Image: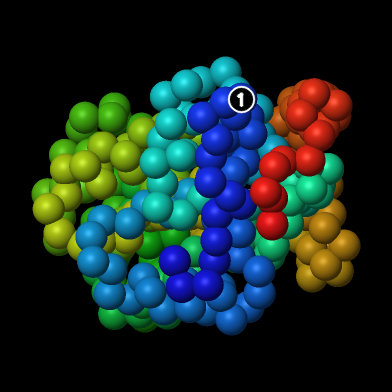
């Protein structure tokens, strides 16, 4: 896909954890990232863009449908330092950190003028995100609550004439909606699984200062600001994720043919 590459071809005997990691779209440099974004200006079909972070990895191990939706995505990007460390443990490249909080606004900016549909967060944050995007020159043609059920959400999205769909319901719901939406659309479109992206755009959650981001500590900044919501994900989930990384390294060693 214009410069980026899968970790490697999935082997039939791979355990599900390794198969998921092999499916990651590794972006080696800024030129490859720019080429990917440029390719979204005129997609040939419905393109699903998803992200895998440590929390998503943990959830995917216990949810086969979610795991399959991630692996069916046209691009599955590495999000965060945790997955990068796990890849390095397994002898694979981590590439750029392609987190959706930064990448999705870049995609929207590159595709300015295209019609956008939003599905996700509760009010008043949905309305505020919509207003922020419109103030930035984007054309938002639909903004809906994304928690009204899979069938109803997909029906509303299919009925609009958007070119780009930003789904912000969190894992694994947004990935299920994306998979169904891509299957039902009969035209080119870009479907972005954005997690808390609309909350960030609306100002509900603050971004970490640049110094924290450069130090790869944005997760800690978010934990400090939202301890009740995030402590299980970042503390308990981090321990579980680290365990899986160590286990995979001991059981399987470096991934064969990892680049």
In front of the other: 162 or 59:
59
Q: Residue at x 21, y 30 (%)?
A: 151
Specify the quadrant of the image occupied by residue 244. top right
Query: Can residue 3 be seen at all in this image of the molecule?
Result: yes
Query: In the rendered image, which residue does mark 1 sit on?
Result: 15
For this view, does 167 lie left or right of residue 186? right
- Name the image quarter holding residue 86: top right
Is 55 in front, or is 253? 253
Residue at x 47% of width, y 39% of height: 70
Percent position of residue 129, x then y: 44, 60
Is 237 left or right of 185, judged from the image as shown?
right
Q: Is residue 198 left or right of residue 27?
A: left
Residue 122, given in percent of the width and then of the height, sits at: 43, 41
Label 1 sits on a secondary structure element that is loop
Q: Position of residue 124 (x, y in %)?
A: 44, 48
Local packing at callout 1 (Cα closer than 10 Å; few below 14, some 14-19, many 20+) is few
Q: Position of residue 91 (x, y in %)?
A: 79, 48
**What is the quadrant of the C terminus in the image?**
bottom right
Q: Is residue 95 above or below residue 39?
A: above
- Whether residue 235 appears in this view of the structure is no
């Amino acid at each position: 896909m214009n410069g980026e590459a899968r970790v490697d071809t999935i082997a039939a005997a791979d355990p599900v954890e390794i198969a998921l990691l092999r499916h990651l779209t590794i972006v080696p440099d800024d030129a490859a990232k720019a080429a990917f974004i440029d390719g979204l200006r005129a997609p040939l079909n419905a393109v699903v863009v998803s992200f895998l972070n440590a929390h998503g990895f943990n959830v995917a191990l216990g949810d086969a449908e979610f795991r399959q939706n991630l692996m069916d995505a046209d691009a599955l990007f590495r999000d965060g330092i945790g997955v990068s460390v796990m890849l390095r443990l397994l002898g694979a490249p981590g590439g750029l950190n392609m987190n959706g909080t930064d990448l999705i606004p870049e995609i929207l900016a590159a595709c300015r003028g295209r019609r956008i549909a939003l599905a996700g967060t509760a009010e008043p944050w949905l309305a505020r995100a919509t207003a922020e995007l419109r103030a930035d020159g984007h054309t938002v043609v639909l903004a809906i609550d994304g928690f009204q059920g899979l069938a109803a959400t997909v029906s509303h999205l299919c009925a609009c004439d958007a070119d780009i769909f930003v789904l912000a319901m969190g894992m694994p719901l947004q990935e299920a909606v994306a998979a169904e939406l891509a299957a039902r659309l009969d035209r080119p479109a870009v479907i972005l699984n954005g997690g808390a992206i609309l909350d960030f755009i609306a100002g509900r959650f603050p971004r970490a200062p640049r110094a924290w981001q450069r130090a790869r500590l944005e997760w800690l900044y978010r934990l400090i600001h939202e301890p009740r919501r995030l402590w299980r994900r970042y503390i308990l989930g981090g321990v579980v994720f680290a365990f899986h990384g160590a286990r995979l390294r001991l059981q399987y060693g470096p991934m064969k043919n990892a680049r």
